[in-house]
Image (tube, rainbow, N blue to C red):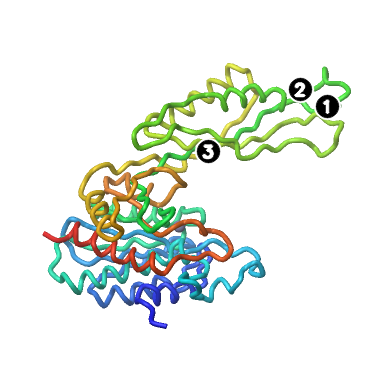
Amino acid sequence: MQISPTIELTQQLISRESVTPEDAGCQQLMASRLEKLGFNIESMFYVDTLNMWARKGTEAPVFCFAGHTDVVPTGDVKNWSTPPFEPVIKDGHIFGRGAADMKGSLAAMVVATENFVKAHPDHKGSIAFLITSDEEGPFINGTMKVIETLEARNEKIDMCIVGEPSSTNYCGDIVKNGRRGSLTGDLTVKGVQGHVAYPHLAENPIHKVSQSIFQLTQTQWDLGNDFFPPTSFQISNINSGTGAGNVIPGDVEIMFNFRYSTEVTAEQLVHQVETLFNDNELNYELKWTYNGLPFLTDEGTLVDAVNIAVEEVTGKKPQLLTTGGTSDGRFIAPTGAQVVELGPCNATIHKVDESVAIADLDQLTEMYFKVLENALLP
Ligand SMILES: [Zn+2]
């Protein structure tokens, strides 16, 4: 069977077993292709994470493809129809861990860049690749560190496409032009442990906290805006109790998360929650984790370039959304870069039998190519 260069490279990437934070030679493979085009390759290794910054050209604007070579674990391989690191083509799809998230996108980026440089050797500006092997893990030593390094030497990204699988029904139907902020709270409410038959000698922390939980779930934090849905509050874990049926527990641990819009700040949410706990006279400890600020890439060169490219390939303009989980775009956008996410359909990501349509990856290659033309031709 005849397969396209994008599919061939996708297969080569899938067969490298790069479970987070391993890279397993994926970046080396990409680098060898980019070097031939005149890219300057910089490997940046931080603690346990291999990253790559590759750049062709020294002028502005800097157009950057960003993505990750690591994949999530397979789970029990017995549940897979075919081995997860042996790519298989079946029914117009390519199967394997990372096919959709996001080795297919990486292959499309490399092949689109090869085609673009061949067609337009005298393009303006620079093309760059920011690739990490720690997006699926704790993300401490990945994109965040590379951005710190670039910022320290005043190297700026002007436009960035992140290859996360943004699409729902067909490739390019949805482009993410921002992300909500994410804020996590680890709460411990203290009571007094005792016998359930002698409640007057104890203080039940679960009872104490329940009113606050109810109030938090009923609060309207904001109404959202044109690009963001309203801020949402969710409890993800509650742990308490000794396991015995006759003991009032001494404390309860609750973990919760905000996905917030640009209508509030993390500081406002923290203040509002702590005020509520104080008003309800809880005895508590609360640790906050700031996972990422919200960002929005409104109108501009990049959004225009992507809109036109997607419409030329699919016949329809994409829908611009900010829903979904966080991505490494949250580390790139605060530098002032325009950032959007454009990638294949996400129906099977992180699942067994992860797959992506071959036609989607070939279309994605064309979209990336046209975005480069729209962004970097005079
Ligand atoms: Zn991903």
Residue identifier under label 3: 184
Mark 3 or mark 1, which is nearer to you? Answer: 3
Q: Is residue 200 above or below residue 338?
A: above
Q: Residue 368's quadrant in the figure? A: bottom left
Q: Secondary structure at mark 2?
A: loop
Residue position marked by numbered label 1 in the rendering: 194
Looking at the image, residue 3 lies above or below residue 53: below
Asked whether the residues under the numbered discs 3 and 1 touch, taking CB atoms below 8 Å apart as contact, a structural biologist would say no
- Sequence-wise first label, 3 or 1: 3
Farthest right residue in view:
197
Is residue 157 in view from this perspective? no
Q: What's the CA distance linking mark 2 and mark 1?
A: 8 Å
Q: Amino acid at mark 3?
A: Thr
Residue 266 place in picture, x, y as percent: 44, 32
**Label 2 beta carbon within 8 A of ligand 1:** no
Between the C-alphas of marks 3 and 2, the distance is 27 Å
Q: Position of residue 336 (x, y in %)?
A: 27, 45
Disc number for residue 203: 2
Quarter of image, ligand 1: bottom left
Q: Quadrant of the N terminus?
A: bottom left
